[in-house]
Image (cartoon, grey):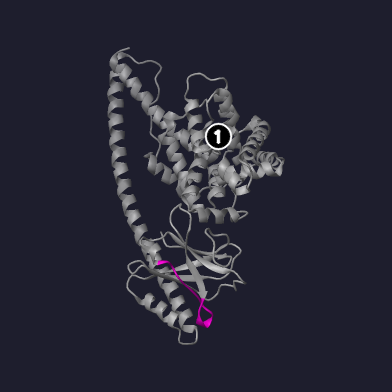
């Protein structure tokens, strides 16, 4: 094959790849955009900020697509992990007082949920069951870390518990969840 | 960090619960060349964290979110139309195809650049409109809060020196009024008249419930720093509570002001926040 043919082929592949990448991002957004939004809203309790996080997440996934390593996470898991990280960054940027106030609230004001297919509802119920079956102190610890973005040390201070106890609770809770959720993790449906 | 040590904390690391030093050590470990199951353990932990998000019913983002993502990644509005694949290319065909693809690539690039520039210009215009609308909104909110406070002050009977001072500050150039709203489960409101040029700010409330042996403490909030004690709300004539913010705390604009209910003498950090109002934004 000549150099020109190789160049043509390379350009063709590049164009195909770019178009395919855009389509892949669109598909990923359809697949888990609603999940990303739900999680960002649960953490930030603010619709506009949650939508900003959704936007930042997918732009970041696009810009860092070369760094994506499929051995580490599925695309949906990657999107959710990035989104959670961005939401927690925003949460941490708020003042300590505002965060303390937010932590006092039991539940954020509800947003209308998207249409939920039966299999997705069943999956959600499975996750809820897995979390509900944790011993209360483990559940509380892991929820403070997951939704509040708190570190071991911050959780220990918040709950007035020894650091070692908090570390053990997080580890045990995550091991149990891993065991119960692993077969179909991560959850992902077909609509945003 | 050894593989065993990493795997001991991997779930907390994936959850983001480890402290900064521990997180850095985990990151460094992951890029090492050889592992005994660390990558698999990390993948499983990440999958579990992602699965936990499945506990929440999904919420559809607004219609504009995907369009905003497209605009930021520079995706064309319509999909790129690709030439059909050919099973084999002769030399001449390949050359022609190469030329066509090069021109197509250049054309697409030029079109994208133009499109990006147009979008950037539109974004700037939209941002300017947004800023103007926000400024207008702030001015209207300020005017409303100002009118409400003036009404509240003038509605109280009696010649009240402190209130006259508040009214004077309210009329001074550069003063703005900030509404301090109740936190969830709390009642009452307050208004703060803030004049940064004069380094003066006063908080006024006629609707907070009785402190019942406690005291209402004022707080200045900046960024992520711990709230700074800024004074107290004291009973004044006419049933009003008045409090001056410590002028030393007004050398720069605070992000927010807050009122909390504290034991007599106040607290070093707020324990029961009643009201809060943002100055920033």
Q: Is residue A95 above or below residue A10?
A: below
Q: Nearer the viewer, residue A29 or A73?
A: A73
For image coordinates 49% across by 67% down, the residue present is B180
Determine the image quadrant of residue A180.
top right
Q: In which quadrant of the rendered view does residue A176 lie?
A: top right
The residue that appears at 31% across and 17% down in the rendered structure is A5
Residue B179's x, y, as percent? 47, 68
Query: Measured along the vertical axis of the image, is residue B12 above or below residue B192?
Result: above
Identity of the residue drawn at 28% across and 26% down: B102
Residue A92, position in %: x, y?
49, 48
Vertical relation: B152 (above or below) B133: below
B50 relative to B105 in the view: left or right: right
**Residue B242 counted in the magenta span:** yes
Q: Quadrant of residue A150?
A: top right
The stretch drawn in magenta includes residue A98? no
Write down the region rendered in magenta. B235-246
Relative image position of residue B127 (x, y in whole percent): 35, 54
Residue indicated by mark 1:
B14
Q: Position of residue B122 (x, y in %)?
A: 32, 50
Quadrant housing the C terminus of chain B: bottom left
- Seen at 37% across and 26% down, the residue is A14
Query: Of residues A32 and B92, which is closer to you in this image?
Result: A32
């Amino acid at each position: 094959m000549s150099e020109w043919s190789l160049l043509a082929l390379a350009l063709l592949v590049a164009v195909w790849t770019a178009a395919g990448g855009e389509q892949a991002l669109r598909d990923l957004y359809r697949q888990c955009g609603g999940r990303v939004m739900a999680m960002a809203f649960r953490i930030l309790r603010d619709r506009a900020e949650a939508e900003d996080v959704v936007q930042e997440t997918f732009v970041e996934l696009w810009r860092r697509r070369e760094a994506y390593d499929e051995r580490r996470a599925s695309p949906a898991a990657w999107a959710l992990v990035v989104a959670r990280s961005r939401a927690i960054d925003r949460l941490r940027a708020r003042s300590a007082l505002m965060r303390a106030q937010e932590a006092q609230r039991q539940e954020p004001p509800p947003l209308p949920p998207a249409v939920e297919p039966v299999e997705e509802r069943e999956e959600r119920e499975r996750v809820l069951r897995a979390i509900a079956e944790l011993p209360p102190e483990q559940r509380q610890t892991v929820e403070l870390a997951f939704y509040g973005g708190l570190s071991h040390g911050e959780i220990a201070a918040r709950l007035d518990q020894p650091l070692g106890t908090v570390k053990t609770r997080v580890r045990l809770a995550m091991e149990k969840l891993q065991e119960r959720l692993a077969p179909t993790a991560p959850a992902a449906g077909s609509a945003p | 960090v050894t593989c065993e040590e990493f795997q001991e904390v991997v779930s907390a690391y994936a959850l983001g619960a480890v402290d900064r030093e521990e997180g850095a050590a985990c990151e460094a470990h992951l890029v090492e060349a050889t592992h005994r199951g660390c990558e698999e353990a990390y993948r499983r932990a990440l999958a579990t964290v992602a699965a936990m998000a499945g506990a929440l019913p999904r919420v559809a983002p607004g219609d504009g979110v995907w369009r905003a993502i497209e605009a930021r990644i520079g995706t064309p509005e319509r999909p790129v139309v690709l030439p059909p694949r050919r099973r084999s290319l002769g030399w001449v065909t390949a050359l022609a195809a190469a030329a066509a693809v090069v021109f197509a690539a250049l054309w697409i690039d030029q079109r994208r650049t133009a499109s990006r520039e147009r979008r950037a210009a539109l974004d700037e215009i939209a941002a300017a409109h947004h800023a103007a609308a926000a400024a207008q909104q702030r001015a209207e909110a300020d005017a409303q809060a100002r009118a409400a406070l003036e009404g509240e002050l003038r509605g109280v009977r009696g010649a009240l020196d402190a209130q006259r001072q508040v009214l004077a500050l309210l009329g001074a150039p550069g003063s703005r009024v900030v509404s301090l709203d109740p936190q969830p489960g709390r009642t009452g409101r307050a208004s703060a008249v803030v004049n940064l040029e004069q380094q003066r700010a006063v908080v006024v409330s006629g609707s907070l419930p009785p402190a019942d042996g406690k005291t209402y403490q004022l707080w200045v909030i900046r960024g992520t720093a711990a709230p700074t004690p800024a004074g107290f709300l004291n009973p004044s004539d006419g049933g009003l509570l008045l409090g001056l913010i410590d002028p030393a705390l007004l050398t720069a604009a605070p992000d927010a002001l807050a009122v909390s209910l504290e034991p007599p003498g106040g607290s070093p950090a707020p324990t029961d926040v009643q009201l809060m109002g943002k100055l920033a934004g």
